[in-house]
Image (cartoon, rainbow, N blue to C red):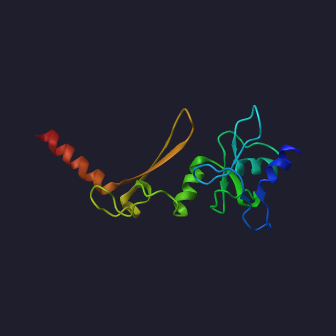
């Protein structure tokens, strides 16, 4: 049995439009995990599915992203290559972000609405890993903090 045959034997292949779920071991977040064999390390199943479908690995830094939002899905029609930043953007757009500061309706400090002109979006790229981090800050809280600092300096 070839490596590819062994891989697809662990996937519940259905019709083209449906999710093809990984039937074996899963990562703690629900993503399938495939072990190609020594000396190769484990690989996320949806990533391996996309590599098999396209016949080549992705460009450096790209991740296999789901259009279906179903972590165990290995259907190549539901997968595409994209950056970590794109994955985080998709996660926020689809309402899957964890309930942290990135998706709050009101800021945690002053209770100001985190919408429209009151939100400052900043991106930062880690120079070593190349990962992009996106943060949302409350402009009203920033103004209040700056006023307090200026008042403190004047004393």
The C terminus sits in image quarter:
top left
Q: Residue at x 71, y 52 (%)?
A: 24
- Specify the farthest residue to the front: 24
- Left or right: 94 in relation to 53: left
Q: Nearer the viewer, residue 138 or 65?
A: 65
The N terminus sits in image quarter:
top right
Q: Nearer the viewer, residue 136 or 38?
A: 38
Q: Residue at x 43, y 58 (%)?
A: 99
Q: Is residue 54 shown to the viewer in this render?
A: no
**Measured from the top left, where is residue 54 in percent x and y?**
81, 49
Height in image: 113 above or below 133? below
Q: Nearer the viewer, residue 41 or 78?
A: 41
**Measured from the top left, where is residue 93 in percent x and y?**
54, 62
- Left or right: 136 in relation to 64: left
**Measured from the top left, where is residue 58 in percent x and y?**
73, 43
**Measured from the top left, where is residue 148 in percent x and y?**
19, 47
- Left or right: 145 in relation to 78: left
- Specify the farthest residue to the right: 1
Q: How many marks?
A: 0
Q: Is residue 121 shown to the viewer in this render?
A: yes
- Left or right: 106 in relation to 11: left
Q: Residue at x 72, y 64 (%)?
A: 19
Q: Residue at x 15, y 45 (%)?
A: 151
Height in image: 93 above or below 85? below
Q: Nearer the viewer, residue 150 or 76?
A: 76
């Amino acid at each position: 049995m070839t490596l590819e045959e062994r891989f697809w034997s662990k996937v519940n292949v259905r019709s083209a439009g449906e999710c093809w779920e990984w039937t074996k071991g899963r990562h703690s977040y629900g993503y399938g995990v495939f072990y190609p064999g020594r000396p190769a390390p484990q690989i996320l199943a949806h990533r391996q599915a996309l590599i098999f479908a396209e016949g080549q690995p992705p460009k450096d830094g790209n991740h296999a992203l789901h259009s279906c939002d179903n972590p165990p899905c290995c259907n190549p029609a539901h997968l595409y290559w994209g950056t970590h930043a794109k994955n985080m953007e998709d996660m926020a757009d689809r309402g899957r972000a964890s309930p942290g500061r990135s998706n709050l309706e009101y800021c945690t400090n002053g209770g100001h609405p985190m919408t429209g002109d009151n939100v400052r979006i900043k991106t930062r790229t880690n120079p070593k890993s190349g990962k992009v981090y996106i943060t949302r800050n409350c402009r009203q809280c920033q103004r209040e903090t700056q006023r307090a600092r200026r008042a403190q300096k004047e004393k």
